[in-house]
Amino acid sequence: MTKIIINADQGKERISRHIYGHFAEHLGRCIYDGIWVGQDSSIPNTRGIRKDVVEALKEIRIPNLRWPGGCFADEYHWKNGIGPKEKRAEIVNTHWGQVTDSNHFGSHEFLDLCEQLGCEPYICGNVGSGTVGEMQEWVEYLTFAGKSCMADLRRENGRDQAWKMTYWGVGNESWACGGNMRPEYYADLYRQYQTFVRDYGDNKLFRIACGAYGEDYNWTEVLMREAAAQMSGLSLHYYVFPGTWEEKGFAIQFSEEEWFLTLKKAIFMEELVQKHAKIMDKYDPDKRVGLIVDEWGLWHDVEPDTNKNFLYQQNTLRDALAAGLTLNIFNRYCGRVKMANIAQTVNVLQSMILTDAEKMITTPTYHVFRMFAVHQDAMALPLKINSGEYAFNNDSIPAISASASRSADGLIHISICNIDPKNAIEVKCELPGIKPVQVTGQILTAPVMNAHNTFENPEAVKPGAFDEVKMNGTELVLQQPAKSIVMLEVSE
Ligand code: AHR
């Protein structure tokens, strides 16, 4: 039995909708094929952007989209991606298979995509191989409403109005693909670059410094010590490799041992958030600087017979549970975690969507984002969990994870994951301070651990109604099935 106590009459931090953000890199078939097909394509599109993908992402209320990378960002020269398409420079995508990138998807197309999605753009600028002047001009080109050669160039390219934009990253993984820098060196570069990332008119940028990977706490320490005053956010990247970096393991074929280890590694995100946040607290006790987890997710071996540089992987109920666990962590630490971006949106890593020419399917992870969208901008409710354990071999991890929030319309939402693949668990949720009058639920589960959607069977994993929950005074009692994610909606 698991007991969850939720103080539904309390709560002082909002869960930023940006925790539910996404990431689209020029990598494999994410941008080209997955999002951009071009205006002449027979695949239905709006100005070259797939309609089916836009519709699907709108349904999960995508709040922001990070672009153009990833590692690609530190080799991206934005001027190659503007102006008439036939004149755009073809470049080699050195990180991801040395394929040719036509640059047909550039700044205008990305910002058109964001407008079609109704989401905020999050651009990551090039520090590794770009210049300060190049980054300065990009910001001016995009956001300056007055007269200048950059703003005029934008107008010549068909966009009169400056774009409104908030999120700006200064380099990506500068400790590796972004330039193999030491934190001291990057901290200085960050201070320099961000100086020239100007706020034009009333456009106020939220400047995000490149942060650590995983347990590199020294990176966070140095960046906070040297540059906290100049940043609005500091990033963190963490991927779960079910096996090792060299042999990650397949997305679909895995044992219970791999299920266990994967979810154990996903839970580790909590320790990472706590420890990085503790360092940030030292330099920024008022929590002005957001922890921005702008790359996270499960990274498997590529699907058989696909290009190993394209990072195309399937997505099962295991991915869905890892996503649910992680989003519960971000919700619970929303005082510091202000944004997160799962990697990546379409056809790459733990994606929301898979495409095959004109066909498109959504993944189990997509359904988690759809179910959890109710937490966006809601008030986080403090909770305590006394969870039973999921034991495997000689190890164990908490079987149940949860988070709760109250939305503007007063409804309370509780998301609960049971990662035990074999046992249903009785969960008692106490809600002291309120009188629930109605509870409804949704569930995402499937008969087997590796259930997934395919182009032939696109709805093998999808949410359904959940009614195994009873009200007992101020308590809710539910039988949560094995390997499931439940979202409860409580009204009082
Ligand atoms: O998401 C794939 C890659 O992972 C990104 O390009 C990079 O930032 C990270 O190492």
Image (spheres, grey):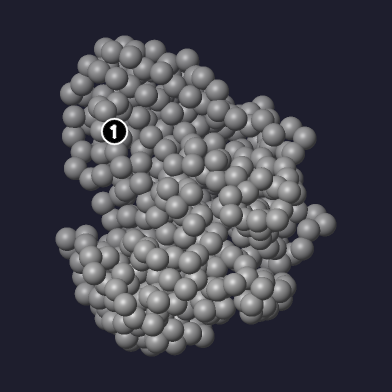
Residue 92 location (% of width, % of height) = 68, 78
Q: Is residue 461 left or right of residue 375?
A: right
Q: Residue at x 35, y 46 (%)?
A: 17
Q: Is residue 179 above or below residue 112?
A: below
Q: Residue at x 39, y 13 (%)?
A: 470
Looking at the image, can residue 98 be seen? Answer: yes
Q: Is residue 6 above or below residue 202?
A: above
- In this view, the residue in front, 479 or 454, is 454
Looking at the image, can residue 210 be seen? Answer: no
Mark 1 neighbour class, 10 Å CA radius: few under 14, some 14 to 19, many 20 or more:
some
Considering the image in quadrants, where does the N terminus appear?
top left
Residue 359 location (% of width, % of height) = 72, 42
Tell me the amino acid under the disc marked 1: Ser
For label 1, the residue is 407
Q: Residue at x 62, y 67 (%)?
A: 104
Identity of the residue furthest to the right in this view: 305
Q: Quadrant of residue 441?
A: top left
Q: Is residue 68 left or right of residue 289?
A: right
Q: Is residue 322 left or right of residue 39?
A: left
Q: Quadrant of residue 47?
A: bottom right
Considering the image in quadrants, where does the C terminus appear?
top left
The kind of secondary structure element at disc 1 is: loop
Residue 100 location (% of width, % of height) = 71, 74
